[in-house]
């Protein structure tokens, strides 16, 4: 599982190790507890990773998770691999969430 080296703090640097072992670094651009996190990503050149927690349109007590990667300037190979890794991580999270709800 991925982890951060320290708790995230707005405007501060972060270091994040993905499940694959890839290390991401950058700064925390936005941090709304329980809702939104936006991270610059040095590994992408000029890019950001954004995570959002959004209320489900089907159930008021359920939240959905969205992740996006945006990159501008010169493209890097890491962007497409990162999108694949985030997709896999969201799938693992969905499986864990589903199993917790059915225990």
Image: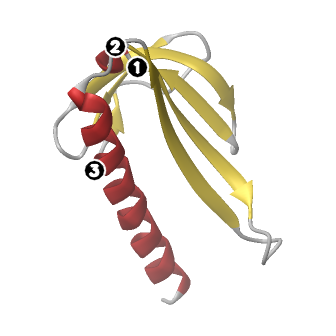
Q: Residue at x 78, y 71 (%)?
A: 61
Q: Nearer the viewer, mark 1 or mark 3?
A: 1
Q: Residue at x 29, y 39 (%)?
A: 80
Q: Residue at x 30, y 43 (%)?
A: 2
Q: Position of residue 56 (x, y in %)?
A: 74, 67
SS of the residue at dot 2? Answer: loop
Q: Which of the labelled discs sits on residue 83, or is there none? A: none
Which residue is the site of mark 2?
A: 74
Front position in the image: 68 or 8 = 68
Q: Nearer the N terminus, badge 2 or badge 1?
A: 1
Q: Are marks 2 and 1 in contact (CB under 8 Å)?
A: no
Q: Residue pushed farthest left? A: 21
SS of the residue at dot 1? Answer: loop
Q: Within 10 Å of the Cα at label 3, are there few (<14), some (14-19), or many (20+) other Cα atoms? A: few
Q: Residue pushed farthest front? A: 74
Residue 6 shown left or right of residue 58 in the figure:
left
Rendered position, 83 above or below 48: below
Q: Position of residue 23 (x, y in %)?
A: 24, 27
Q: CA distance from mark 2 to mark 1?
A: 14 Å
Q: Nearer the N terminus, badge 3 or badge 2?
A: 3
Residue 47 shown left or right of residue 21 in the figure:
right
Q: Nearer the N terminus, badge 1 or badge 3?
A: 3
Q: Within 10 Å of the Cα at label 1, are there few (<14), some (14-19), or many (20+) other Cα atoms? A: many
Which residue is the site of mark 3?
A: 1
Which residue is the site of mark 1?
A: 41
Q: Residue at x 51, y 89 (%)?
A: 102
Q: Nearer the viewer, mark 3 or mark 2?
A: 2
């Amino acid at each position: 599982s991925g982890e951060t080296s320290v708790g995230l703090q707005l405007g501060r640097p972060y270091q994040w190790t993905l499940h694959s072992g890839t290390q991401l670094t950058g700064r925390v651009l936005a941090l709304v507890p329980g809702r939104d996190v936006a991270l610059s990503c040095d590994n992408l050149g000029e890019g950001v990773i954004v995570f959002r927690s959004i209320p489900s349109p089907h159930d008021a007590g359920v939240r959905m998770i969205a992740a996006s990667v945006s990159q501008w300037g010169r493209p890097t190979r890491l962007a497409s691999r990162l999108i694949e890794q985030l997709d896999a991580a969201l799938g693992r999270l969905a499986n864990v969430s589903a199993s917790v709800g059915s225990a």
